[in-house]
Image (tube, coloured by chain):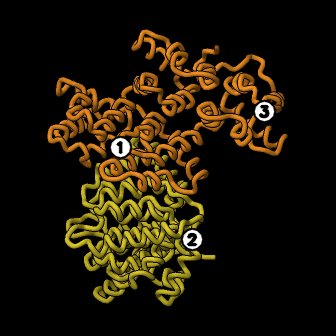
Chain colours: A orange, B yellow
Amino acid sequence: MSTISVPVSVPSPAEDCEQLRKAFQGWGTNEGLIISILAHRSAAQRRQIRDTYAQAYGEDLLKALDKELTRDFEKAVLLWILDPPERDAVLANEALKKWSPGNRALIEIAVTRTADEMLAVRRAYQGRFKRSLEEDVAAHTNGDFRKLLVPLVSSYRYEGPEVNASLAKSEAKILHEKNKEKAYGHEEIIRILTTRSKAQLLATFNDYNNEFGHPINKDLKSDPKDDFLFALRAIIRCIICPERYLEKVMRLAINKMGTDECALTRVVTTRAEVNMKHIKEIYYNRNSVRLDHALKKDTTGDYEDFLLALIGQDA
Amino acid sequence: MAVPLAAEGCEALTTAFSGLGGLGVDEKALLSALGKWRHQPEKRAQLRKSFSGFFTADGGFERCDIEFARFKDIMVLWAMHPWERDARWAHHVLQKVHPFDIIVEIACTRSSEELLGARKAYHALFHHSLEEDVAFCVKENYSNLLVGLVSAYRYEGSWINKEMAKSDAETLGSEIKGAGVSKLVENEKVIRILTTRSKPHLRVTFKYYKEMYGKSIEEDLGDELCLRETVQCLDSPPKYFSKVIDDSLKDGADKNTKDALTRVIVSRADVDTKDIKAEYHEHYGAQLEDVIAKKTLGNYRDALLSLVGQ
């Protein structure tokens, strides 16, 4: 569920634009005002504000914000203003430009979005970067990772609930076999994980557990340093329960020496209107501390205020 | 008296089916050949014995079924939504052996949005994703290529990075030259380029290839049929389709080859029939309408001509 709170009587886009313009004027910037407006508008409202601002002042709101804001706060606000598909496209492009085997942002996006959402991301990617997403993934990755990631971003999974029980059984067996042979990059593993519907995969993973006595991820832990295994486990966890996976991403981002603002910004801006409430609950159950408290301790200034507003906890 | 009658009637029937190797049935000729033998069952009995077009040796009559069905098929397919059409063709073909040509054709000659639509229709009709079924049903060495081709959502703009196109041409060249024993159709680099790049980019890449290596990439692909067809479909659908049509109109063509005539004419009617006719004229020196009028029969012919005509 969303953690964004929009005021009951929301100002018109024109009024919002006026306020934002005031926030930019003069020396310095009124970040608090910016947060109080933008963090409390839905995607549709933000789009209207962006259009109205361009009409009224002849400038893209994003450019204006780019001039006024800095660093992590700026990045978070700019991402927040974008439409979800464009946001994901920008994040995917970013992840690719500095891709390394340990980078799992692409997997996170490709697997936690629905099939239609991912399609919209691919369209937005083309519109913005004049290339297809799969083209860039193929060009920036190599070896087994490329074999895994290109189909992962290209798949258009069936979204229905139908499950073929005997297929789940036979594919659980195939997965188990390949795991035993340590043939983790095998075509069959990639085929199953990147093309089957999520419902079918859940049935397959359940079958794996029932048949072999432990979850499939246990068999993918043979080498803790192997990034490819990590990637496979991430895909599986995103399919089984995306919110639990995202909680872990946030937890690791917060607990890291310094903080992984990149990951924090990504998860918060992309999930605030989707399932951040659920992620917060999982966070509290897992860590016995509220997410907003953890963020208060770990982040500062306007960036902190913005994140808190997005997760439904204003200062 | 009986022998000449049967021979003459048999000839008329054979003509109505165009020697049983034809495309479609001349319904009017059939009527006039058979219809006149009312109250003359013994004449019909003789026709039945000498004409093998309707009944097979064991009494079945599927042989003529196929030819009679051509008109029905073309009408039903024409009425169908293009996405559903493509989804049904793909699904049907995945159940048979060697499905690659129709899958490649659909994946490479449709626009990105049309291919997407076909994938959506596939979901709705068959409760699986197209790529899921291709990956599962195609066990041959071209499986990865096909999965890549049907999953593509290519950039459709005309913007091309010339340096990248040159580099792709070089990569293709070195992989083709160095192929040796291993099959090119499983080559990752080749698959990557053919399944992810935009079509304008690929056309420029193929041009650079010819400049660099003196031969067209098709020629250099030799007997890698699947790859050759992929390249042909990506490079110039009208040229590819004009060849498919020509093959279907040849004498002695098998059922799949003949069925392609309906498939191509129907699927391209709203797209590039004009270009296909131009290519056909250039390569085979005849007007497509004339050849269709000569080689096909009956209502089927009329249907084809109405889809191909001005």
- Up-down: is B220 above or below A64? below
Check the image and name the residue furthest to the left: A181
A23 relative to A278 in the view: left or right: right
Check the image and name the residue furthest to the top: A288
Asked whether the beta carbons under mark 2 and mark 1 sit within 8 Å of each other, the answer is no
- Up-down: is B139 above or below B217? above
Image point 47% across, 53% down: which residue? A136
The amino acid type found where label 3 is placed reads Phe
B11 relative to A118 in the view: left or right: left
Asked whether the beta carbons under mark 2 and mark 3 sit within 8 Å of each other, the answer is no
Mark 3 highlights which residue? A24
Callout 2: 10 Å neighbours few (<14), some, many (20+)?
A: some
Mark 1 highlights which residue? A101
Q: Chain of mark 1?
A: A
Mark 2 highlights which residue? B272
Q: Is residue A64 visible?
A: yes
Question: Which of labels 2 and 3 is toward the front?
Answer: 3
Q: Chain of mark 3?
A: A
Q: Earlier in the sequence, mark 3 or mark 1?
A: 3
The amino acid type found where label 1 is placed reads Pro
Secondary structure beneath dot 3 equals helix
Image point 51% across, 88% down: which residue? B286
Secondary structure beneath dot 2 equals loop
- Up-down: is B237 above or below B2? above
- C-alpha separation, residue under disc 2 versus residue under disc 1: 44 Å
Image point 51% across, 67% down: which residue? B201
- C-alpha separation, residue under disc 3 versus residue under disc 1: 40 Å
Q: Position of residue B67 (x, y in %)?
A: 39, 69
Asked whether the beta carbons under mark 3 and mark 1 sit within 8 Å of each other, the answer is no
